[in-house]
Image (cartoon, rainbow, N blue to C red):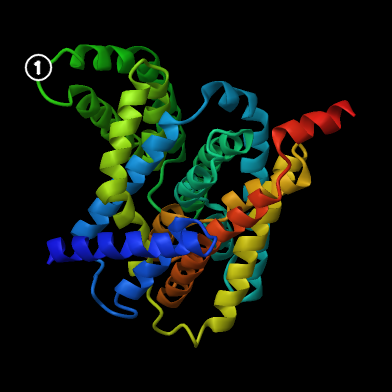
Amino acid sequence: MLIFQLAVILIASKIAGDISVRLGQPSVLGKLLIGIVLGPTVLGLVTDTEILKEISQIGVILLMFIAGLETDIDEFKRTAKSSTSVGIAGIVMPLALGYGAGIAIGLSNIEAIFLGLLLSATSVSISVQTLKELGKLKSREGATIMGAAVIDDVLVILALAFLMSFAGGDVNLGMVVLKKVAFFAIVIALSWKVVPWVLKKFAPLQVTESVISAALIICFLFAYFAEYTGVAAIIGSYIAGVAISLTNYKTEVTHKVETISYAVFVPVFFTSIGVTAQFSGILENLGLIVLLSVIAIVSKLIGGAFGAKITGFPWKNSMAIGAAMVSRGEVALIIAAIGLENNLLTQDMFAVLIVVVLLTTIVTPPMMKWFFSKTTQPEEMALKKNA
């Protein structure tokens, strides 16, 4: 059954992606939508099995690994201030509006704060693919988006741990913070000294594709360590990619990992997002879904854009950055599952938020396409500055 599902996903995702591009949209939009068609909601050809989830997880890890490989570290350093501003502003506005909406619909203070935190999460895995297709991943905007995503992820997880300690969850806040600090300290040290050494030692081995194997080992271990310490696995794989991008093996690893990833794993990831969609009971909660979707999209868009604008980006470029932060993706789904498990979300609210997360993910690629088509190019910015 799995083999058949993989064949269906690969055929459908490639065709849907091509149609999406022909219609003037990023290919990832077609891949997301075809997942809904293939899933239980429409055709039922693909089901959300555990093994499909695992393959999908590998897909998103590899996608963020590639993003790390293609990161310009000098540009990343230059945009640190902008990334921090975008990350923080992109949390404050969704948190405030989400809390307000929670209170308005009758949630308790703790539940409303949890809702705000869930809407504050962001996942740029979808945005990464769109940035690649638009040729913007290595731009100043791309570096800002990637940095902001890391900051957003860490701050939301820390805030969630703080909230859970008050909500009666079995959470040691000091240990949570310590784990995060330990993660970044250790992976930075490993990236600086150990990663180049490992690649250098693997390169002369008399086996096929030794360097690529070493790179994937590093990627998966960093992702595992990130997840183990409470940081998203995608952050670990992204940092692994950045570490390898600073070595002489960057080009070889990038080329071959892209081949592996885009042939199988990444299409499964994009399509599986649509497959997981459950629309049962949607009509009964349609008003709430619309309200929370509008809050989720507008708050992240405006919050991220404001954070970029106050650090020197033109408004059009700022809006493009804000648009890239809109998708909540798998990060919000994980937080929603935590809320359901700890009785901070009812089953009905959980179902509503799954649809909201899906909608934010679907609207992100066309929004990015539109806003980036309006952005001021670097040379134009320079001319205006010197005028």
Give the image quarter of residue 37.
Answer: bottom left
Give the image quarter of residue 17.
Answer: bottom left
In the rendered structure, the answer to whether residue 186 lies left or right of residue 212 reads right
Pick the front one: 295 or 125: 125
Image position, residue 27 (x, y; %): 45, 57
In the rendered structure, the answer to whether residue 148 lies left or right of residue 31 reads right
In the rendered structure, the answer to whether residue 196 lies left or right of residue 287 reads left
Write down the residue under mark 1.
206
- Residue at the extreme bottom of the image, as rendered: 284
Whether 111 is drawn above or below 191: the answer is below
Q: Where, quadrant-wise, is the N terminus in this rendering?
A: bottom left
Whether 258 is drawn above or below 22: the answer is above
Image position, residue 325 (x, y; %): 58, 50
Whether 331 is drawn above or below 103: the answer is above
Pick the front one: 16 or 265: 16
Pick the front one: 272 or 24: 24
Q: Where, quadrant-wise, is the C terminus in this rendering?
A: top right
Q: Secondary structure at mark 1?
A: loop
Total numbered circles: 1
Residue sitting at 64 percent across and 24 percent down?
78
Whether 55 is drawn above or below 108: the answer is above
Residue 22 appears in the rendering:
yes
Q: Label 1 amino acid?
A: Gln
Pick the front one: 112 or 33: 33
Q: Residues within 10 Å of mark 1 (few under 14, many from 20)?
A: few
Image position, residue 33 (x, y; %): 42, 68
- Residue at the extreme right of the image, as rendered: 387
Residue sitting at 55 percent across and 61 percent down?
24
- Residue at the extreme left of the image, as rendered: 206
Residue sitting at 61 percent across and 58 percent down?
367
